[in-house]
Amino acid sequence: MSNSSLVNHTRISPNRNSPRNQPISKITVHHMAGNLSVETCGSVFAPSSRQASANYGIGSDGRVGMYVEEKDRSWASSSSWNDNRAVTIEVANDQIGGDWHVSDAAWNKLVELCADICRRNGMTSLTWTGDKNGSLTCHYMFAATSCPGPYLKSRMAELAQSVTARLGGASAPDTSGGSSAPSGSVTDLANRVIAGEFGNGDARKAALGSRYDEVQAEVNRILGGGSSSSSSVDIDQMARDVIAGKYGNGDARKAALGPNYNAVQARVNEILGAGGSATGGADIDALARAVIRGDYGNGEERKRRLGSLYDAVQARVNQLL
C-alpha cells in the first residue's frame, strides 16, 4: 500500500496496529474539535498514553499531515472493524463549537485527498448511506459522539458525490445553493434535522436548499414551536445555549425563552438524554480533548465555560490523562 503524495508533514504515531488486517474499502471523516495545525495534531497523537491516532490530518490552511501509514490501522473510530477497513482523516475546525465549521481550503483538500485515497486503493466510487454500510463513514456511527460536527456531517453526501465525480463516476453535485435539495418527505427530513444530520444555521440552510423553509417549519412543529412566529428560530442552537447556561434556570429560563420555551426545553432534554444525563448528545470526547489542549482554561473558568457538561467532560479528561 502506498501513501498520499499530498502529505506536507509526517509524524508517525505509536498508536496503531501494523499491518491492518483488512484491505482498504472505506474512508472515515473526523474533526479535530479545534483549529490545529498538522504539526500540532501530530504532537497530540505522539504520546503512547494518548491511545488515539488517525491516518491523516488536514489543517485549515489545506496542508496535510500523516500520522499512520495507510498499510497500518489507526486508532480513530472506537471500532477496530471500521479502522481496519478505513483510511481515517482528521479535519481542523476554523470555528470552535456551533456547527464546527471548516475552512474552504480544508474542505477542498479533503475532497482531493479522498479522491487520491480511492484511486490508489482501487475504489471506483465513494458512497454515503448515512450508516456504516457506505464506503464513507463518520466517527459518530461507532461511538457516542457528534464527530465530525454538524457542518461536515451535513456535507457528507456532497463529499461522496464530488469524489466520485473526480473518479469518473456520477456528475458533481450542484453547490450553487439554487435548486438542489435532499429528497424525502418533509417529516422525514425534519426528523433528520432534529437528529443533527443537517447541522445548524447556514449549514442547515445550505444542506436543505430550497426545502429549508418547509422543513424548518415542521421541525418547529414537532418540537412544540407551534406558530409561524418561531419558524425563523434555531431551536437547536437555543437549546445548546441553554445547556451552556446562557438562559439561566427555572422561571428565569421560561421568561427569557418566552413562547419558545417548550420547544427549546424539549430539545434540551433530547440532547442531554431522557434521564437528564449530561452525556446525551454532547460530544464529550471532543470537548475533553479540547480541554486537554487548553481551550477551556482551568478551575472556575473551565467550570463556567462548560456549564452543565463540566462533570462529564472532566471525568473524560481524567480518563484520557
Image (cartoon, rainbow, N blue to C red):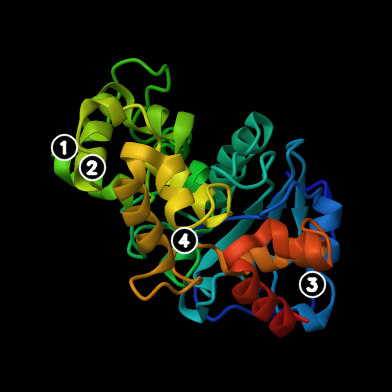
Q: Residue at x 25, y 48 (%)?
A: 223
Q: In the picture provided, is 239 more to the left or to the right than 297?
A: left
Q: Residue at x 46, y 64 (%)?
A: 140
In the rendered image, residue 282, in percent from the top left (x then y), is placed at: 51, 62
* Residue type pointed to by label 4: Lys
Q: Earlier in the sequence, mark 1 or mark 3?
A: 3
Q: Secondary structure at mark 4?
A: strand
Q: Is residue 51 above or below residue 181?
A: below
Question: Which residue in the protein does label 3 denote?
Answer: 13
Residue depth check, mark 1 versus mark 4: number of the one nearer the observer: 1
The C terminus - image quarter: bottom right
Are circles 4 and 2 on residues that touch, CB within 8 Å?
A: no
In the rendered image, residue 166, in percent from the top left (x then y), is placed at: 48, 34
Residue in the foreground of this view, choosing between 240 and 46: 240
Question: Which residue in the protein does label 2 denote?
Answer: 189
- Mark 2 and mark 3: Cα distance apart in space: 40 Å
Are circles 1 and 2 on residues that touch, CB within 8 Å?
A: yes
The crowding category of the residue bearing disc 2, from other C-alpha atoms within 10 Å (few below 14, some 14 to 19, many at least 20), is: many
Q: Which mark is residue 239?
A: none
Residue depth check, mark 1 versus mark 3: number of the one nearer the observer: 1
Q: Earlier in the sequence, mark 4 or mark 2?
A: 4
* Residue type pointed to by label 3: Ser
Question: Which residue in the protein does label 1 denote?
Answer: 186
- Mark 1 and mark 4: Cα distance apart in space: 31 Å
Name, please, the residue furthest toward the front: 251
- Mark 1 and mark 3: Cα distance apart in space: 45 Å
The crowding category of the residue bearing disc 4, from other C-alpha atoms within 10 Å (few below 14, some 14 to 19, many at least 20), is: many
